[in-house]
DNA sequence: ATACTAGGTATCTTAGAAGATACTTATAAT
DNA sequence: ATTATAAGTATCTTCTAAGATACCTAGTAT
């Protein structure tokens, strides 16, 4: 599909980055791309996230239909988060992001470190 | 290239999203993908950005070698920002982001709006 | 009875990103 | 002389995402 309206294209970039951006969403999605995960499983893999933040991010991604909250059992209380059919499409995007990152990490991330030190 | 280490892959996702994320960087890059632009040209196309924010974001992208500041003339004072040879590789990433956005905008952005209203 | 696990919620605080506003230097135009 | 344009810089303020901390409900294990 061609992009006719450039301003439109730029708006789309901003919208998508809003979905996948922030401190945690990309990581959460990257984890869920692999396989469905439970709340505390995600929490421990993300290591530094707090419950409240994780809940908030998961609710957001649920709201926009990227992922689904599935109650596996009520006793014991087991909940599983997995990508919706629709949300699975994000895998390719994540893959592209990783590929770009691998190709460019030397040049970019080296200077990024230096740049952060200055600040 | 295969990703062997999954934690590594997730780190890369976070790093790349850090570069391209935030409120303005994606937009700035999308504009510069098209053609080099001058400071005030960018400023007016981004409409709501302030000088200080634009300067800061441009310096960051310059630091990590994604773009280059080129003094076109000193009198009058004309400066042009353009992607480095290296930075041009970001075009494909932006293109992929736009494509994903176009495919999924109905389902995602509709619910995003709704989700934002709730907040 | 007590404590532990799973999956959270409810407040409050904090740090950092972004915005508002004013100013600057150098040249050109009227 | 004055005003305008280009490309910023310097402070200060505000806003908001994320963190800290404490607590909750329901079942399970000891």
Image (cartoon, coloured by chain):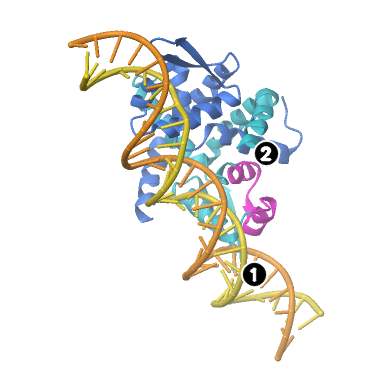
Chain colours: A cyan, B blue, C orange, D yellow
Mark 1 falls within which chain? A
> Which is more foreground, mark 2 or mark 1?
2
**Classed neighbour count for the residue bearing mark 1: other residues with Cα under 10 Å, few (<14), some (14–19), many (≥20):** few
Residue under circle 1? Answer: A76
Residue under circle 2? Answer: B11
Where is residue B47 drawn, in percent x and y?
33, 30
- In this rendering, does residue B104 appear at all? no
Left or right: A111, with A18 as reference point:
right
Mark 2 falls within which chain? B
- Provide the major secondary structure of the magenta segment: helix
Left or right: A42, with B44 as reference point:
right
- Viewport quadrant of the N terminus of chain B: top right
From which residue to which does the magenta span run?
A27-48
Q: Is residue C26 above or below residue A118?
A: above
- In this rendering, does residue B85 appear at all? yes
Where is residue D8 drawn, in percent x and y?
45, 26
Badge count:
2
Q: Residue at x 57, y 45 (%)?
A: A23
């Amino acid at each position: 599909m061609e992009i006719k309206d450039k301003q439109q294209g730029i708006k789309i970039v901003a919208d998508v980055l809003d979905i996948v951006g922030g401190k945690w969403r990309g990581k959460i999605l990257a984890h869920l791309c692999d396989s469905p995960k439970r709340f505390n499983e995600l929490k421990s893999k993300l290591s530094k996230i707090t419950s409240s933040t994780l809940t908030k991010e998961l609710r957001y991604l649920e709201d926009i239909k990227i992922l689904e909250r599935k109650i596996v059992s009520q006793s014991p209380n087991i909940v599983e988060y997995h990508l919706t059919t629709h949300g699975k499409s994000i895998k390719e995007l994540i893959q592209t992001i990783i590929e770009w990152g691998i190709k460019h990490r030397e040049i970019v991330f080296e200077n990024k470190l230096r740049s952060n030190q200055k600040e």
